[in-house]
Amino acid sequence: MTNLFLERGRILDRSPRLSGGHGGRVLLAGTALAAALALGGCAVGPRYERPVAATASVFKEAPAAEGWVPAQPGDALDRGEWWTRFGDPQLDALAARVQISNQNIAAAVAAYTQAQALVRQQRAALFPTVGLDGSGRRTGAVRSDGTASPTNSFSASLAADWSPDLWGRLREAVGSAQANAQASEADLASARLSAVGDLVTNYFSLREADTELRLLNETIEGYERALTITRNRYEAGIAAQTDVLQAQTQLVSAQAERVALRRTRATYEHAIAVLVGAVPADFSIAVADWKPTVPAVPTGVPSLLLQRRPDVAAAERAVASANAQIGIARAAYFPNIGLTASISSSTSRVRDLFDASNMLWALGLSVAQTVFDAGAIGAGVDAAKAAHEASVARYRQTVLAAFQSVEDQLSATAALAEQEGLRRTASLAADRTEQQLLNRYRAGQVNYTDVVSAQASALSARRSLVQVQLARQTAAVGLIQSLGGGWEAAWLRDAAPLAEAARSPG
């Protein structure tokens, strides 16, 4: 390593080969060369290209029916408040609380803020650092006659240090940090989408439990009336005691199911409390009517998932970051060049610190090059390339999983819509059967066992209808989440130029 310094206008060469004015010319030439290279430096990292992933022109499971045609650009989900499509004001209020108080979202916000700070930190390394130092000291010696002879000394210095980014290592680090920050932004979107999705799912499950509880309450009232009828018939000697016992069994079983369903509802309520950042003991949701609204969800073109899915966007940004790491590893093949400049002064009086006669200035140029490392740099480059290949594979797998998720939700949506119609028909038929058998039992035409069987079937059919309505809403939420919830990473529309913006062309 060679170090050159200028002091008070004359060259002080710390290398035995340079001295006098010749050394000064070498320093000035080296400084000029470093500045030129810094301006025209060439990044040694590979140019980033967005990985090619498998895609399709249309979704296989999207039916060609009204509300499910491929969406045009203006048909995309509204960004942000997608949950308002379900038309429930209380759900909207809870979703707003999640945005503010959910701790998983708060952690993701902090991680994104940290990632942005790291970008600024990496970018700061492109510029010189300047430091100011000052000191003052008073010393004294005691003479033989007992008197003191104090002296003062003061010093001040201003120093600058800069390592020009000749090989693009620092710019690659900035690009990597920017990609990581964008991935963190996508992670934040994922956290919000997940938290709100969990809220919506739990809220609908709670409302479905309210509806089932209402059905059970109505059914229990009917069972109580049926028990009264069987008791009267038994006391009149018309019915057997087994009819009374069967009616009691059915009534108590329904009451037990109601207790279990209340516990399930409480569990959903506690989960919602945690999602909105509240203590379950201080949180409650009043019983209310359920709106089993299932909004039409435009799917759009499959390739839009590459921008609309936060997890896909984050995986792609991880590839960009890994690509930049290859350049950082390659930069180790080239020398590090450092420029330093300082001006200092020392005197016994403060007012003389800034006198020209007390000034000492220095300029320096340093070059460091690794001569032998037993292949360590090459191994680092190979490791960076392997990490990049792994990130590409993870990105492609994430894309495939995204397509699978959408297809699954489309298939479920279509099947559940058809199933709801069948369940409604079955429920209406079971209700009519129950009423007819109960009337025939009163007339003494059938056994009570037939009534019990009909009542159990009717209750099961009613609950099945409500459950399939919940499943349809849950599938709609799942589809919206699979499509990215309306979020879109605009910076992924042209990822390669974005990655190159932080780098000069080589």
Image: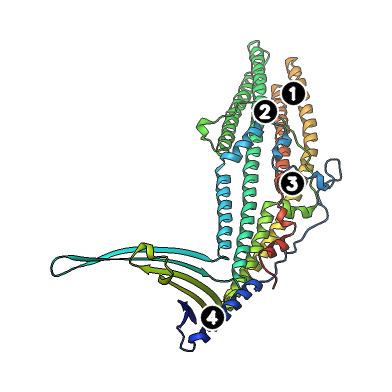
Asked if marks 4 and 1 touch (Cβ < 8 Å), the reply is no
On-image quarter of the C terminus: bottom right
Task: Tell me the element at label 1.
Answer: helix
Going from N to C along the chain, the mark reached first, 4 or 2, is 4
Asked if marks 2 and 1 touch (Cβ < 8 Å), the reply is no
Instruction: Kindly report the distance in space between the C-alpha atoms of the residues bearing marks 2 and 1.
Output: 20 Å
Going from N to C along the chain, the mark reached first, 3 or 1, is 3
Give the residue pinned by disc 1: 434
Instruction: Kindly report the distance in space between the C-alpha atoms of the residues bearing marks 3 and 1.
Output: 36 Å
Give the residue pinned by disc 4: 27
Crowd tier of the residue under label 4, counting other residues whose Cα lies within 10 Å: few below 14, some 14–19, many 20 or above? many
The residue at 65%/20% (across/down) is: 223
Instruction: Kindly report the distance in space between the C-alpha atoms of the residues bearing marks 4 and 1.
Output: 102 Å
Amino acid on which disc 1 is placed: Glu
Instruction: Kindly report the distance in space between the C-alpha atoms of the residues bearing marks 3 and 2.
Output: 25 Å
Tag on residue 211?
2
Instruction: Kindly report the distance in space between the C-alpha atoms of the residues bearing marks 4 and 2.
Output: 85 Å
Task: Tell me the element at label 4.
Answer: helix
Q: Where is residue 505 in the image (x, y as percent from the top left)?
A: 70, 70
Amino acid on which disc 4 is placed: Leu
